[in-house]
Image (cartoon, rainbow, N blue to C red):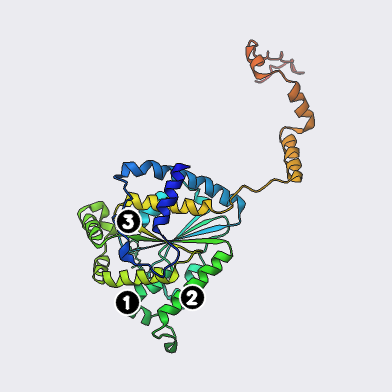
Amino acid sequence: MAGNDWGRRLVKSFRVEDGRRFRLGDYDPGDTCGLKSKEHAEKRLQRDVARLAELQDKLYAQDRWALLLVFQAMDAAGKDGVIKHVMSGLNPQGCQVYSFKAPSAEELDHDFLWRTARCLPERGRIGIFNRSYYEEVLVVRVHPEILAKQKLPTRLVGKRIWKERFSDITAHERYLARNGVVVLKFFLNVSKGEQKRRFLERLDRPEKNWKFSAADAQERQHWKQYMAAYQDAIRETAAEHAPWFVVPADKKWFARLVVAAAVADAMERLDLAYPEVTAEQKKELAAVRVQLEGGPHRARRKARRPHRAQVARRPLRRPEAPAAEPLPDGGEPTP
Ligand code: ATP
Ligand code: MG
C-alpha cells in the first residue's frame, strides 16, 4: 500500500484537471521526483505493469468501462517507447493502438473528429491514440497552411476557430466520459535540448537512421509556437473527467513510470470487478462439470476409484494379449 501511496502522489504532481492557472513553464522536463536512475525505477515500473495486467483482466471481464489513452508530444519525446513498455504486460486482445498521421483525402472530407471517433475503444478495452484530434489545435494551429487545405467553408474559419475547437473537444470528451469511456491525456514533455540529443543519436546510429526525418528537425524552428499551442490546449481542455498529465520526458524511464502509475491509478478508482455468478449460473456450471466428467454414472464410479497414490504402489502389469483364434480357413491371423 505504501508503494501505491507513493504512486498516487507521483501521479498527482503531474495531473492537470483544472487548466485555468496552468503554465507549461512550471513543469520541468528533467524532473525525476528524486529517483536517481533507471535501476531505481525498474522495480516500481514492473509492479505497476503487473497491477495494470490484473486491472485490465477485470476491465475486460466486466465489460462496462473503456479507457482511452491519448499520447501527444514533440518528435522523439518517446511516445512509441512509452506505449511499448507500459503496455508490455497487457493482454493484446483487450488493447487497440491507433496512430494518426497527416489526414488522407477521405479524412479531410469529414469533420475533424470523424477519423478518431471511428477508432474509439469498445467497452472492456483500452484504446491508445498515438497522436489524436489534438493535432487539430497543435500542428494545424502552428501551420495555418494546413488549416487552409481543410476545405472548410470560408465563413466558418474565423478568429474564434481555436476556441471553437477546444469547446468541441471538451464536449466530445465529456460525452465519452458520460458513456463510460475514461479519457486520460498524456503530454510527454521533452526539452528542446534533449530532443536535439536524440536527433543526433538517430543520425549517429545506423539502426536508428530510419527514425530520422529532415522535416522533424525543421519543426524545431517552431518550438515556441508549439509550446504555446500545447499550453493553450491543456489550459482549455483539462477537466476532472478528462485530465492531462504533463509527463517529464527527458528521462525515458521516468516518463514510463509516470504513465504506468497514472493509468493504474485511474483504473483503481473504477469499480472494476469480475462479474458476479448468480445461483442459477452456479447450478448450470455444476451441471456442465458433471457432463464433462462423463455423466453422473461415471462421476460416481470415479469417486469409488482408489486414490492415485494407491494405484501407483501396485506393481505395473502389462495386460496379456488374448490368444489369437484360429481363422476358419486354417490360415494364420494377420497382426
Ligand atoms: P514517429 O516520428 O515516432 O514515427 P510520429 O507520430 O511523429 O511518430 P510521423 O509519421 O513522423 O509520426 O508524423 C506524423 C505527422 O502527422 C506529425 O508531424 C503530425 O503533426 C502530423 N499530423 C497528425 N495529425 C494531423 C492532422 N490532423 N493534420 C495535419 N497533420 C497531422
Ligand atoms: Mg515523427
Estimate the x, y position of residue 136 in percent, counting from the top left: 40, 73
Estimate the x, y position of residue 228 in percent, counting from the top left: 32, 72
Q: Ligand 1 within 8 A of label 1's CB?
A: yes
The residue singled out by tag 3 in the image is: 249
- Kind of residue at disc 2: Asp
- Kind of residue at disc 3: Ala
The mark that comes first in sequence, 2 or 1, is 1
Q: Vertical placement of 273 versus 231: above or below? A: above
Q: CA distance from mark 1 to mark 3?
A: 25 Å
* Residue 22 shown left or right of residue 90 in the figure: left
Label at residue 168? 2
Point 56% across, 54% down: residue: 270
* Residue 335 shown left or right of residue 93 in the figure: right
Q: How many marks?
A: 3
Q: Is residue 303 visible?
A: yes
Residue sitting farthest toward the right = 297
Label at residue 143? 1
Of discs 1 and 3, which sits in the foreground?
A: 3
Point 26% across, 64% down: residue: 213
Q: Vertical placement of 148 versus 92: above or below? A: below
- The kind of secondary structure element at disc 1 is loop
- Which quarter of the figure has residue 235? bottom left
Residue sitting farthest toward the bottom = 155
- The kind of secondary structure element at disc 2 is helix
Q: CA distance from mark 2 to mark 3?
A: 29 Å
Q: Residues within 10 Å of mark 1 (few under 14, many from 20)?
A: few
The mark that comes first in sequence, 2 or 3, is 2
Residue sitting farthest toward the front = 21
* Residue 284 shown left or right of residue 84 in the figure: right
* Residue 207 shown left or right of residue 69 in the figure: left
Q: Vertical placement of 188 versus 144: above or below? A: above
